[in-house]
Amino acid sequence: MKMKSLITAAVALGATTAFAEPEREVSVTRASSQVATAGAPEHFTGSVKVQSRFQASSPARVGGGLVSFEAAARTAWHTHPLGQTLIVTEGSGLVQHWEGDIQEIGPSDVVWIPPGVKHWHGATSEDGMSHIAVAESLDGKTVEWMEHVTDEQYGQNSGGDGE
Amino acid sequence: MKMKSLITAAVALGATTAFAEPEREVSVTRASSQVATAGAPEHFTGSVKVQSRFQASSPARVGGGLVSFEAAARTAWHTHPLGQTLIVTEGSGLVQHWEGDIQEIGPSDVVWIPPGVKHWHGATSEDGMSHIAVAESLDGKTVEWMEHVTDEQYGQNSGGDGE
């Protein structure tokens, strides 16, 4: 009986946590209160800045932010378990999936990277590029980082003379 | 036996559909190929344009686009089953949840609207406003539309003299 009481108490406690008060109000995170963070050197090459980060509350699972790459800056190779959408806001950029051609992207272009597809994105060698990035998490993970994009890989088509 | 064969065939067919070839390539939807659509009069007041629409493929469920409101234009009251994130890209806008104060929003502000919270968003009476809108679908639905925001409701704080 004592054990049963303990279990009942634990379940009750769990229920309280699980059924937390729902959010009832719109919240605004001001631009002035946001801290821009630098892209970590282990996952990026060159100067990369992330602003306007967002993360929806559970049961929603989407998050992202505005990522700005200086000229020649780019992500490492990586995958997303549920894919990622990029909406280019300014500048001139590049995106490539493993064994695919490098594609140039510009303002208002929308990029869809399917789940599990190894790829990178970044700026051209001549211009910076900014995009909004949007991805859903699976089991708490939104990205699997891999090796850097070498200068040789990047240089294949970074002079703006390709497709 | 005949019935069993039919069921077996149906299950096999279902399996083929369910395990369709996974997407293996990054896809780019060019700005030049995108068609801007007008916000439907039953869900918006004033002139509203939607561009750069995106919809992730299942099992992802996020979608959205760039929504541009001319001065004084706004959504009707509505809710989102899994909430919505807005990232303001330019101009000067307003957002309000039911029985809350109207809040002004500007470039790079990030707005979180929790699931089920009745609200509206739009431009101020003096300036247009554009935002990226990001929302996940639940059972195929991303929005529940309600009544229009009246001029009286909108006028409570549309002159830029409020909070």
Image (cartoon, coloured by chain):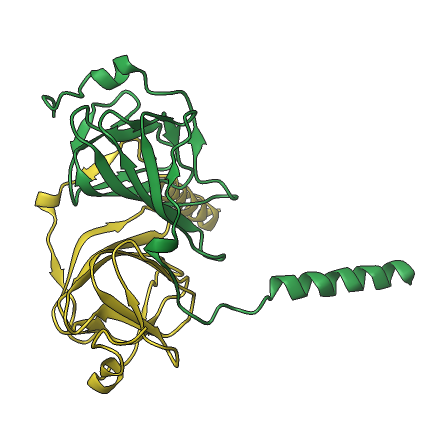
Chain colours: A yellow, B green
Q: Quadrant of residue B16?
A: bottom right
Give the x, y percent position of residue A10.
40, 47
- Is any part of residue A53 visible from this angle? yes
Q: Residue at x 24, y 80 (%)?
A: A154
- Is any part of residue A21 visible from this angle? no
Q: Of A134 and A63, which appears nearest the observer? A: A134
Q: Quadrant of residue A46?
A: bottom left
Q: Is residue B2 above or below residue B45?
A: below
Q: Of B103 and B117, which appears nearest the observer? A: B103
Q: Residue at x 31, y 29 (%)?
A: B47
Q: Is residue B115 above or below residue A140?
A: above
Q: Is residue A21 above or below residue A141?
A: above
Give the x, y percent position of residue A136.
37, 56
Q: Of A147 and B1, which appears nearest the observer? A: A147
Give the x, y percent position of residue A5.
44, 44
Q: Residue furthest right?
A: B1
The image shows a total of numbered marks equal to 0
Q: Of B147 and B8, which appears nearest the observer? A: B147
Q: Residue at x 49, y 46 (%)?
A: A1
Give the x, y percent position of residue A95.
30, 70
Name the image quarter holding the C terminus of chain A: bottom left
Q: Is residue A134 left or right of residue A160?
A: right
Q: Residue furthest top?
A: B152
Q: Residue furthest bottom?
A: A152
